Amino acid sequence: MNTIEFYNDWKWQIANRISTLDQLEEYIALTREEQAAFEGEIPLSFAVTPHYASLLKNDALRKTVIPTDRENKVGTGELADPLGEEDHRATPHLIHTYPDKVLFLATTFCSTYCRYCTRSRMVGKPLEFDVSTFDETFQYIEEHTEIRDVLISGGDPLTMTDSVLDELLSRVRNIPHVRMVRIGSKVPVVLPQRITGELCSILRKHRVWLSLHFIHAAELSPETQTACRILSDHGIGMVSQTVLLKGVNDDTQSLIDLFYGLLEINVKPYYLLQCDPVQGSEHFRTSVEKGIELIQSLHGHICGLAVPQYVIDAPGGGGKVPILGKEQIRREGDDVVFLNYLGKEYRYPDPL
Ligand code: SF4
């Protein structure tokens, strides 16, 4: 293979991930603060694909993947497991929080690690993901006939091989009461070379929806646009989840640019997520009031299809709560208090 063929091969992209300071400095000049983060122990997993590294001249993107020492600080109310997923772990690979939906943790591997990841407690760390270890999980889903919606996530499942994915999806699709199968992934953004015709055929065969993770219009590289168009041409439904991040996308124009850009490649903006209070995320988190201000600056002002739901994932496992206006929340000191879909009160730590 020549250089371009290597670059366009997703396995080459993974094998040549940037995971050290020296490798990163071949792509961009780091600030002193960024260099300093590599001198101590980096608490969250670090790796970036060569493709995503090529986009890091953009300041917004570099903040989301390059470590800083600010992630060593544990802010007020921050937790390793902010959504209380471990309390709802039904099998080693399955989180069962909502009545009819389960989260299938298929891998802990991502090709690129986000500094604000809700599952930073596990991503990049060992977890068996051979299909043979999934039996207990399939059995659980088979026995719980109330489960209609299976979200396969991790880690990033689209980093698994075609044959492993095909087998996993076949087994989920063979469970008669499962009606919806989704995969959560950032692969079209950080590893667009993975979107091959063979992968699309597998996704189409199993009628999979993709729940993609975009945070900024600068991620809409020509390669990513092509990947999403290939997926769309294969009839794969796609929605996007965007985490609201301070200094990255917390202004109206950045959100408009991203959401219109997504519609242009057939990805429906689905959620604008208040950043979860995961350990080391304080420098990324905006106030809830800021999130409300931003979503209200979109409603009615831009195409309705381009407007996602602004949601807070209720800490402790209360589920996603759509927030439309300030009347839905009340402040109690450093907490924002709101009700979830069951009318139960939850608190989001939001220091003034
Ligand atoms: S791609 Fe998703 S699972 Fe992987 S590090 Fe980013 S947010 Fe976490």
Image (cartoon, helix red, strand yellow):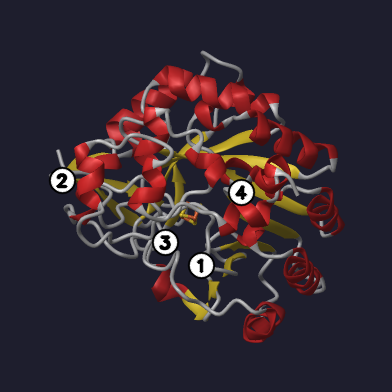
Which of labels 4 and 2 is toward the front? 4
In terms of secondary structure, where does tag 2 sit?
loop
In terms of secondary structure, where does tag 4 sit?
helix
Residue corresponding to mark 4: 187
Q: Are marks 1 and 3 in contact (CB under 8 Å)?
A: no
Residue corresponding to mark 2: 334
Q: Which x, y percent locates residue 228?
A: 71, 37
In primary-sequence order, the first of circles 2 and 1 is 1
Residue 108: mark in rendering: 1
Amino acid beneath label 3: Arg
Which of labels 2 and 1 is toward the front? 1
Q: Is mark 3 within 8 Å of ligand 1?
A: yes
- The residue depicted at 65 percent of the width and 35 percent of the height is 224
Q: Is residue 10 left or right of residue 163?
A: left
Amino acid beneath label 4: Val
- The residue depicted at 48 percent of the width and 36 percent of the height is 215
In this view, the residue farthest toward the front is: 2
Residue corresponding to mark 3: 119
Residue 333: mark in rendering: none
* Measured Cα–Cα span from mark 4 to mark 3: 17 Å
- The residue depicted at 78 percent of the width and 48 percent of the height is 196
